[in-house]
Amino acid sequence: MKMIKLLVSASLVVATSPAFVTPAYAVPANSTTETRMANTCAALVDATAKLHDGTPVYSTTVLNVVESEQAPVNTDTEVPGSRVGTGTPTYSGLSIGAGPYRIGGSVNMFGDQVATTKTYPGYTYKFDRVSSVTTNYTFGCEITQATEHFVPPVDIPGHKVQGFYVNCDFGHGNGNDNGGETVCDANSGSQQSCAAHNATGDSLPFWGEDTEQCKFIKTGDAVDAVHIDGYWVDDADIVTTVPGKTDSQIDITNSYGLDGVSNLPLVLTGNWFVGQVVICISPSTGGQKGVPGAWRTQNGYGGGSLVGPAKGCNTPYFKIAPWGGGSQDSNGTYISVPGY
């Protein structure tokens, strides 16, 4: 298949159909290019870094994409056998085929002129085009870093009921008995064990309970111990932008059966019929016009005898030659036919 580089050949003048002059310019990035750009941004961060729950620390986004299209590059392939000659052809390699034969009442005999070469001054043809368009992209990468911190667990201690012990006679005959009424006094009598209770404090197993000679005076409730688990807190994301990244994409458009015109000659070889020409003539060479002359060949005929009755340029054959056209009844005077 012949390749025609129409963009660089000075020997061709190209005319096209509307499809020819509408090349496929760049289109937005396709999914493959978008994935490639996303991977470029992802490569800027540590993909193995994880938060406490296993989610990635970093995420990236492609942004500020700018397209720049280059001129299309066309490769054209002529469709074999699609050439059609234009203009008036010329012929070469001329010879005479069928003949001699007569036409109507002419005193000449004719033959079919044929040629081995037919040349047109130009031609039209069909071709297929592959249009390749490269689009360059510049873009930036937005990097988002997720941050967090851990709040450690807290243990808040509790305590037993708050208060103190005082000496008190609960009717057992010890301590102060004021007229039969129970009197409690932290500093009275010989019962000093209450003071010992107070000195020991709430580590006593019976702390907060009345004993035989000591009464507990409550000043505050007991408080249970509290444990608060540690937990993670999401902090504000850190966002940065990295500009100046690049990529490119090639888009191919195929167009079929486009029309082209060439001003180069189209040379065809074969067996071409040119037309009917005189191959036997007997003009007078002098004296009165119409006086019989002698037979002679012309237009390259050399396939017959000038002496009859053999096929060729001679009067006996003229009388029996077939007709190649016209009426066989349109007989002339034939005064120019030698010896008729």
Image (cartoon, rainbow, N blue to C red):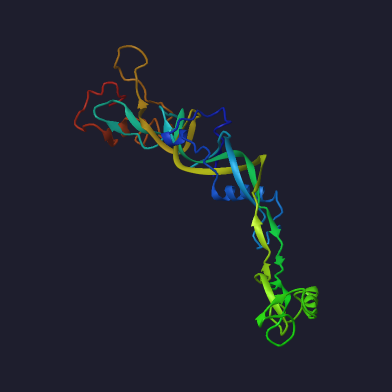
Indicate the quadrant containing the N terminus: top left, top right, bottom left or bottom right.
Answer: top right
> Considering depth in this image, is 175 or 245 the residue closer to the camera?
175
- Left or right: where does residue 245 sit relative to residue 94? right
> Considering depth in this image, is 189 or 328 the residue closer to the camera?
189
> Considering depth in this image, is 252 or 85 the residue closer to the camera?
252
Q: Residue furthest bottom?
A: 172
Q: State whether residue 213 is above or below residue 241.
A: below
Q: Residue at x 28, y 25 (%)?
A: 107
- Left or right: where does residue 209 sit relative to residue 313? right
- Image location of residue 173, percent across then percent down: 72, 87
Q: State whether residue 54 is above or below residue 124.
A: below
- Image location of residue 105, percent across then percent down: 24, 27
The answer to whether one can see residue 81 in this image is no
Indicate the quadrant containing the C terminus: top left, top right, bottom left or bottom right.
Answer: top left
- Image location of residue 6, percent across then percent down: 54, 33
The answer to whether one can see residue 264 in this image is yes
Q: Which residue is drawn at 42% across and 29% down?
A: 89
Q: Which residue is drawn at 72% across and 62% down?
A: 152
To which quarter of the image does residue 296 belong? top left
Q: State whether residue 81 is above or below residue 180.
A: above
- Image location of residue 24, percent across then percent down: 50, 38
